[in-house]
Amino acid sequence: MIAQLRTAERQLALILSGLVAFAGLVMAAVGRGDPMGAQGWIVALCAGLVVIFLLRGLDGPEPVEDRATAYYDDPTRVGILISLAWAVVAMSTGVWVASQLAWPDLRFDGAWSSFGRIRPAHTSGVIFGFGGNALIATSFHVMQRTSRARLAGQVSPWFVLFGFNLFCIVAASGYLMGITQSKEYAEPEWYADIWLVIVWVTYFTLYIRTLARRNEPHIYVANWYYMAFILVMAILHIVNNLAIPASFAGAKSYSAFSGVQDAMIQWWYGHNAVAFFLTAGFLGMLYYFLPKRAERPIYSYRLSILSFWGIVFFYIWVGSHHLHYTALPQWVQTLGMTFSIMLLIPSWASAGNALMTLNGAWHKVRDDATLRFMMVAAVFYGLSTFEGSFMAVRAVNSLSHYTDWTVGHVHSGAMGWVAMITFGSIYAVVPLLWRKESMYSWKLVEWHFWLALAGTVIYVFAMWNSGIIQGLMWRTYTDSGTLAYSFTDSLVAMHPYYVARAVGGGLFVAGAVLCAFNVLMTIRRVPDRVPEYDHPTSSEAGEPAVPAGE
Amino acid sequence: MSVKERDPLTGHQTTGHEWNGITELNTRVPRAVWFFIIVTHIWALVYWVLMPAWPLVNSYTRGLLGVDQQERVERQVGAANAARADWTTPLATLDAAAIRDDPALMAHVQRTAPALFGDNCAACHGTDAAGGPGFPSLVDDAWLWGGDAETIMETLRVGINSPHPDSRYAQMMAFGQSGILTRPEIRTVVDYVQSLSGLETEADADRLARGATLFEENCASCHGENAMGNQDLGAPDLTDAHWIYGGDDASMFETINAGRQGWMPAWEDRLTVADRMMLTLYVQDLAKEADNAD
């Protein structure tokens, strides 16, 4: 890691992490007596560890080779490993949260372990910790390969990666202490939000600068999606988190919006976090790793254009479908609903484009669990986007809203689509990143695939059943025209599905553990192999294009 | 740069670009995609014409159907209330005995009250109405304030120790913490009270006699000379087998030492008179069923 940096770069990194450590100490001093003070110590500790690490390597020999002749893979490697660590931790937390709903005593009477605190730790840990690190890592990889250019910075990729993880750690530890601004998927308080803006702008700048160096005349589709993800997330994050801190010495802030406007901004953010974080970013992953693994050309460039612009244009309108039948004016609900329907075809065009790309490679899907992960991800992407548009219809929403159906829908997307494409991409990229012959064990990949698929199917079916039963019980009337069931009756009815959901989640976690083990063993045990053609070249070098399928 | 090639499998041409081995075919967008894009857009257009849809400067397009969700929900709630009026009105106006005499009304009560109880009362009193630590059981026919319909209706209306201006008030004093009784004295009273309800106690007759004296001096003013309680004050009967906060040594010591002040919300603003009447009849029946089961 540090051996790749020149002395001046090491000094810059040292100054930056020293500044962060100092900022942490300031937070700890100013915020003592407030949970923000504890957060300050966490920041200081994390940054302090980086400072110590840098000091130990500060006087090491400088890199001798010309760095421009190689891709910069260290940040990707570390990002993949961090992503897997978050996957195991945050998904296990998810199983715990799910089990608490079936067996409430699993809280063990702790305040920190109550449902309201560990649930955001699960969601943020999976979305940002697992998903975010995987996106950052693969975006570095894909951008370099499809541009045939090395990353534009030496220190900034590390700043983005570690800065982002600092945000994740501050967020997750804050939830356990009870720090939240009560905005779904945007729970962290003002100081964490400001830090993420700094990190994210650096990320975007790095991406644009690398793109500007590219040795390809055209920008590949995957990069459109990665860029949409980075740019729009910045806008969403900044607007949704506009808030006035109650005091600069404390963790509490008040949103700049109130009432239904606040709800609307929140769900404009919330749904576009799904759109641009969990969809656009991972479509970038899909668009690179699926054709690469299948060794097939993308089915249709024209379909890519249509679905990209369809997705980015329509998604931004649909957040209000989370607020059907509320105080939100009906015309806003109408727009959210109709745009959700118009969004369906561009979404399906993406899924279809991915699946049609596999034509001519279906025997590989059968034999190669890595490619099968990607194929199943595309299928679940199609299923979830159909289900999402369907649930956005007001009449359907009147049944599904506030029920577990929503939870099932989210997890069919998060487990079936996001996690599957990520695991497939990790299995594809790890041997290449560490210059290995293959993964340590293809059998473990196969086991992981079936565990993940079984877990997802059990989870989603349990929540469909639970959600629809709930929704129907809440709207069942007696012959007297009064409610037939109390809310508690519906809770009792959901219990078996909650148990099933915890089992499904458990299988999924088991698969993630196998993945982490397999990756670590690949790094340690598998013989090295240097791949051909994996270095940046200028277009003038005239390297022959490798025709698809050969 | 690179030339367009033809994919042997599909026969389609590539776009001529290549990124680290990835190429793209220039396949035209399938007709079905265009078809469904047109269908979904037409559907959206029709919906916009019919329903409230687009913002204007000070207003919005109201749609040809003239639907308004607020007006609609108010109309539906009004219609549902009107449809129930033939039996909710008698429930709100007749007394409990008259309602019990009308099987048709009682059928409505029996259909409706369980869910009403589940949504409003079960959180404290339990789904089986058997109570729990701190919350009295409603199935034991032991009433703090009285079990006749009129009293239950009033308890539901004003609550206990609630912010309602007519609230019932009841407080068990903190005899230990306020220095009225010493710790050994509290233990003596505990033994005595346990002996009243037939619980096992190791105390000898002498100790029980001292307990009785202490009880008479400190407790009898609320719980009565015979310890049978006083429903005017909400003071529980101590001779029965029912305990709100527990009849074991530790719980009773805590009760006498630190006092107790239970709390029940006032339901006047939350539930209609008919709702409260249904709950009254329902909990009366629960207590009766339990009595018969014994």
Image (cartoon, coloured by chain):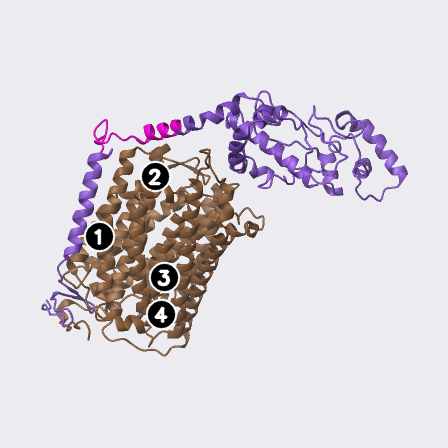
User: First in sequence: mark 2 or mark 3?
Assistant: 3
Chain purple in the figure, letter: B
Residue designated by label 4: A61
Residue shown at 28%/61% (left/top)?
A285
Which numbered marker is on residue A79? 3
- Identify the amino acid type marked 4: Pro
Q: Can you identify the residue that label 1 sits on? A: A346
**What's drawn in magenta, residue-wise?**
B53-79
Residue type at numbered disc 1: Pro
Picture coordinates of residue A221, whole percent (x, y): 20, 59
Q: Is residue A183 left or right of residue B227?
A: left
Label 1 to label 3: alpha-carbon separation: 31 Å
Q: Residue at x 27, y 48 (%)?
A: A232
First in sequence: mark 1 vs mark 4: 4
- Which of the two marks, 1 or 4, is nearer to us in this view? 1
For residue A302, the mark is none
**Disc 2 or disc 4, which is closer to the eye?**
2
Amino acid identity at mark 2 = Leu
Q: Which chain can be seen in brown?
A: A
User: Do tag 1 and tag 2 residues touch (Cβ < 8 Å)?
Assistant: no
Q: Are marks 2 and 4 in contact (CB under 8 Å)?
A: no
Earlier sequence position, callout 2 versus callout 4 = 4
Q: Are marks 2 and 3 in contact (CB under 8 Å)?
A: no
Label 1 SS: helix
* Residue B138 showing in the rendered view: no
Q: Amino acid at mark 3?
A: Gly
Judge left or right: residue A385 versus residue B127. left
Q: Are marks 3 and 4 on the same chain?
A: yes
What chain is tagged by disc 2? A
